[in-house]
Image (cartoon, helix red, strand yellow):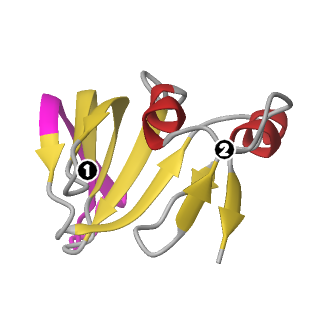
Amino acid sequence: MEQVDASTTVAASTSEGSDLDPIARVRKLLFRQMLVGIKDGRFFLGSFHCIDKQGNIILQDTVEYRSIRRSSPSPTEQRCLGMILIPASCRTSCHVDCSIEEQLSLIQLKE
């Protein structure tokens, strides 16, 4: 999975050119599986639907995963949520599911 952080500038790198506009870069992420972590320790796995100027993310067909402190056979609990909005202020991590080849052709991280 490829990590995309709010503090990192993401630039697309393709054979046509490396100066794709931000909208084109986001379009390449549409409908991909995305794992988003938030400050309280929960994770949401869903299909990337959109992002706004403030960095809020909408996922569809989302499953919530959270750790449970009680002793049980499964250390995590999950529930299906559907479509959710994750505020940028709550987000701690964001991973997009794609192959290594796609990572190399899709995104190049710059400082």
Image quarter in which the C terminus is found: bottom right
Helix, strand or loop status at disc 1: strand
Q: Nearer the viewer, residue 2 or 56?
A: 56
Q: Main secondary structure of the magenta part?
A: strand
Q: Earlier in the sequence, mark 2 or mark 1?
A: 2
- What amino acid does circle 1 point to? Glu
Q: Is residue 47 above or below residue 92?
A: above
- Image-based side of 13 in relation to 62, left or right: right
Amino acid type at image mark 2? Asp
Q: In this figure, which residue is indicated by the disc labeled 2?
A: 19
- State yes or no: residue 36 in magenta: no
Residue in the foreground of this view, choosing between 88 and 40: 88
Residue 1: image x %, image y %?
63, 48
Q: Position of residue 32 (x, y in %)?
A: 49, 27
Quadrant position of residue 97: top right
Tell me where the magenta segment starts and ends, as one range.
Answer: 65-84
Viewer-side residue, 15 vs 31? 15
Query: Which quarter of the figure has residue 100?
Result: top right
Residue in view at x 66 percent, y 35 percent: 98
Circle 1 crowding by C-alpha within 10 Å: few under 14, some 14–19, many from 20? few
Q: Residue at x 52, y 39 (%)?
A: 21
Residue 73 visible somewhere in the drawing: no
Q: Secondary structure at mark 2?
A: loop
Locate residue 57 relative to residue 1 in the image: left or right: left
107 vs 60, left or right, is right
Q: Where residue 54 sits in the image (x, y, percent)?
A: 19, 57
Within the magenta stretch, is there residue 67?
yes
Let me know if residue 82 appears in the view.
Answer: yes
